[in-house]
Amino acid sequence: MLLAFQLLARWPLWLLHGAGALLGWLVFVLSPTYRRRFLDNTAQSGLSVSQWRPAVAAAGRLSLELPRLWLGRAVPIRWQGAELIERALAQGRGVVFITPHLGCFEITAQAYAQRFGPSHPMTALYRPARQPWLAKLEARVRARPGLLTAPTTRAGVKQMLKALKAGHCVGLLPDQVPPLHQGLWAPFFDKPAYTMTLSTRLAQQTGAVTLLAWGERLSWGRGYVVHVLPAPETLSARGDAAVVQLNRLLETLVRQHPGQYLWGYARYKAPRAEGTD
């Protein structure tokens, strides 16, 4: 598999995205479990078929672009809203980046590390892959100059708090189901979803700025646009109210770009104890 990754890393982005679109549709057609979850999630959102259909291909593109992003040449990246980051860093405040399963979430951390990492490194929360070879590869390629990684454990949380208190930045996927006792149930598209409290707690405990960031995948392999947006409202000091606000914020962003959301993710699954698969 590592050899396949190394070979795919040499492909042009347009070819990876073309093959990825085919892969996305093949998985959708051939996997009843995946298709059922995908359709259940889109039905829960209330969006039309024409709105979410492009997301079938986008899921495949997400998978096949990884070798290039991890092991290949740099890809074209543009920014929208980078001044929000510059302003927060100039104030000496850390930044909590909220990046949902929208577009290419891998590129947002890489783009930040490239532009801002030399002076203000980012610590990104991640859950290692279950496959040993992939977990080993992730650990090697995700840690790069200006970009550190933190596991989804209590030690990882301490690492992120330390980074914010030093005026640096952290990034996490707020719609990732956290381990048991590390989240609260809150509506997401009107259905209870176990939602992490970490993103809101980090901002509240450190006074860091909360920003939304997501990587728009451009057509025909033209690269990516990293969008940075301010949180439109102050998050509540109450944990239960804050996660409701967070999910409402994510819903708004997903509704604006449904064709790039990862609808096949098991968003409504029950949490597991820390350290279990």
Image (cartoon, rainbow, N blue to C red):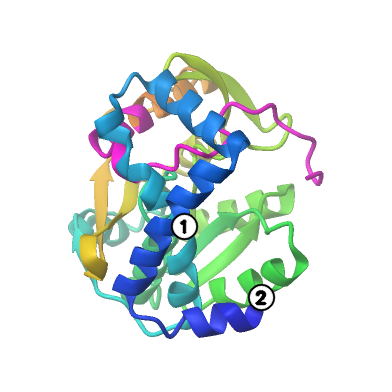
| Residue holding disc 2 | 1
The range drawn in magenta is 250-277
Q: Quadrant of residue 52?
A: top left
Residue type, label 2: Met
Return the residue nearer the eye: 63 or 57: 57
Quarter in which the N terminus is drawn: bottom right
Disc 2/disc 1 C-alpha distance (Å): 17 Å
Residue 183 place in picture, x, y as percent: 63, 29
Judged by its main secondary structure, the magenta piece is loop
| Residue holding disc 1 | 23
Residue 149 place in picture, x, y as percent: 59, 64
Whether tag 2 and tag 1 are in contact, CB under 8 A, the answer is no
Residue 229 place in picture, x, y as percent: 25, 45
Label 1: how many Cα within 10 Å (few below 14, some 14–19, many 20+): many
Mark 2 or 1, nearer chain start: 2
- Judge left or right: residue 82 versus residue 190: left
| Residue pictured at 35% horizontal, 81% vertical | 74
| Residue pictured at 19% horizontal, 54% vertical | 81
Q: The residue tagged with tag 1: helix, strand or loop?
A: helix
Quarter in which the C terminus is drawn: top right
